[in-house]
């Protein structure tokens, strides 16, 4: 584009105008000779730079915006992949805690059994020892009687110089025998009491260890569900990238990190399934068993054993009511928002409370029923997956329910 000389624009009259003078006229003629009448350069070098036309400026802005959008999408995909990798690490940590809890629970159970057996053996030994002492005193009284039993007493009466003294000695020995018997009984009773106290302490230790195992298993299940969701979200972000964004380094790294996270997740989930397979059905306290049975009747087709299995896994039938690491609360481990939508006044006291056993169990029955738990095996699976988004959790709970139904 030609440049206009600085200064005020000249008044035009005719082709070249007037008032320019000789120098001005010469200058205009020179410019016209160089640029031509239309202003297009005829000779000389092209300008070093030119201002963009509106169309080219718009195209450049659009290209810049597209590049920025592609970079942002790729970075978001990578962030999602890194988030999934973090979820994998959390599951691995939870798995380690669950395995440690299982080891402690098994050790506590074995320890409780060993201590109880030792206490029973000690009590039996004390009783046997007392019986031997009493028998020995009756059969061979110290100083007065020789031989054994009734024969020794009769012989002493016939041969002794003072039958009265013999009888008194026998009575004294009998008294000693009674005292010895009483002491033996006391020792046996004391040993039995010690055994009972030991059994109680051992049972409490086993309960605590079992509670820790339940809490660790619950945390593992929750984190496994979160992991599956994070992996899916990260994959969705990658799949949504356009061709330009997918070619960026951030997108390529996101794909690599997500692939590594998915592989680690498969390993962790397999280990979690193995941990779940080691959990056996346990008995429920009478009050909870009654709640499971009554709540199941509110959902046609639901088996009480399913509710009992969920209650065992989620809180150990009220032994560990949370809050969990994810914020779930109460015997059936509801998230507050979910309980707000499905909460039921199970005991009819006018209050709906996730911490209350009756409300929690009846609400769990309602939630599971709404998601298909009364519609056979497949319905149970779908409902349990909604309860906790982990396939191995579904398998574990259904297996425990089967064991409860079978009485094993």
Image: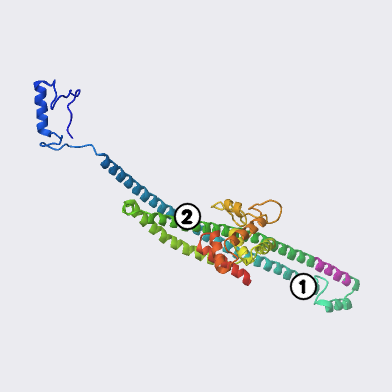
The quarter of the displayed image where residue 141 is located: bottom right
Is 177 inside the magenta-drawn segment? yes
Q: Is residue 183 left or right of residue 360?
A: right
Residue 123's disc is: none
Disc 1 designates what residue? 136
Where, quadrant-wise, is the N terminus in this rendering? top left
- Res. 209 visible in picture: no
Q: Position of residue 229 (x, y in %)?
A: 47, 56
Front in this rendered view, residue 123 or 17: 17
> Which range of residues does the magenta coloring cover?
166-179
Camera sees residue 37: yes
Q: Quadrant of residue 208?
A: bottom right
Drawn side of residue 322 relative to residue 245, left or right = right
Which element type, helix, strand or loop, lies under badge 2? helix
First in sequence, mark 1 or 2: give its number. 2
> Do tag 1 and tag 2 residues touch (Cβ < 8 Å)?
no
**Of marks 1 and 2, the one in the foreground:** 2
Q: Report how far apart the C-alphas of labels 1 and 2 lie in the structure.
A: 68 Å
| x and y percentages locating residue 183 in the rendered image | 77, 64
275 on left or right of 242 = right
Q: Residue 152: where, in percent of width, then height?
A: 83, 77
Q: Tell me the residue at 65%/67% (across/down).
A: 117
Q: Which color scheme does this rendered protein use?
A: rainbow
The residue under label 2 is 90
Main secondary structure found in the magenta portion: helix
Q: Position of residue 255 (x, y in %)?
A: 36, 56
Question: Which image quadrant for residue 284?
Answer: bottom right
Q: Looking at the image, which is closer to me, 165 or 189?
A: 189
Residue reaching furthest to the front: 14
């Amino acid at each position: 584009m030609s440049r206009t000389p600085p200064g005020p624009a000249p008044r035009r009259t005719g082709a070249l105008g007037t008032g320019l003078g000789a120098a001005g006229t010469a200058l205009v003629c020179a410019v016209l000779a160089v640029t031509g009448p239309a202003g297009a350069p005829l000779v000389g070098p092209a300008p070093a730079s030119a201002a963009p036309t509106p169309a080219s400026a718009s195209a450049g802005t659009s290209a810049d915006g597209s590049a920025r959008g592609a970079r942002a999408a790729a970075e978001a995909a990578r962030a999602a992949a890194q988030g999934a990798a973090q979820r994998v690490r959390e599951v691995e940590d939870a798995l380690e805690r669950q395995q440690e809890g299982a080891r402690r629970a098994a050790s506590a159970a074995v320890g409780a059994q060993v201590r109880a057996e030792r206490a029973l053996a000690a009590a039996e030994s004390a009783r046997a020892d007392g019986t031997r002492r009493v028998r020995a005193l009756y059969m061979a009284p110290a100083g007065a009687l020789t031989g054994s039993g009734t024969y020794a007493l009769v012989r002493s009466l016939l041969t002794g110089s003072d039958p009265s003294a013999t009888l008194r000695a026998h009575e004294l020995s009998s008294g000693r025998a009674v005292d010895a018997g009483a002491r033996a009984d006391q020792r046996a009773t004391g040993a039995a009491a010690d055994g009972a106290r030991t059994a109680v302490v051992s049972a409490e230790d086993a309960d605590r260890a079992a509670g820790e195992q339940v809490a660790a298993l619950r945390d593992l299940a929750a984190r496994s569900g979160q992991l599956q969701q994070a992996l899916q979200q990260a994959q969705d972000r990658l799949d949504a990238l356009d061709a330009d964004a997918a070619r960026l380094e951030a997108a390529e790294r996101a794909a690599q990190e997500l692939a590594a996270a998915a592989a680690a997740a498969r390993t962790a989930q397999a280990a979690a399934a193995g941990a779940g397979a080691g959990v056996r059905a346990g008995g429920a306290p009478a009050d909870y068993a009654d709640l499971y049975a009554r709540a199941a009747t509110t959902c046609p087709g639901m088996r009480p054993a399913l509710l009992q299995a969920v209650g065992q896994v989620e809180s150990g039938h009220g032994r560990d009511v949370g809050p969990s690491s994810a914020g779930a609360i109460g015997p059936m481990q509801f998230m507050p928002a979910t309980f707000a939508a499905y909460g039921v006044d199970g005991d009819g006291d006018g209050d709906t409370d996730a911490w209350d056993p009756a409300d929690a169990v009846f609400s769990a029955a309602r939630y599971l029923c709404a998601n298909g738990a009364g519609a056979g095996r497949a319905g149970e699976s779908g409902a349990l997956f909604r309860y906790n988004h982990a396939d191995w959790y579904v398998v574990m709970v259904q297996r425990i329910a089967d064991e409860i139904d079978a009485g094993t």
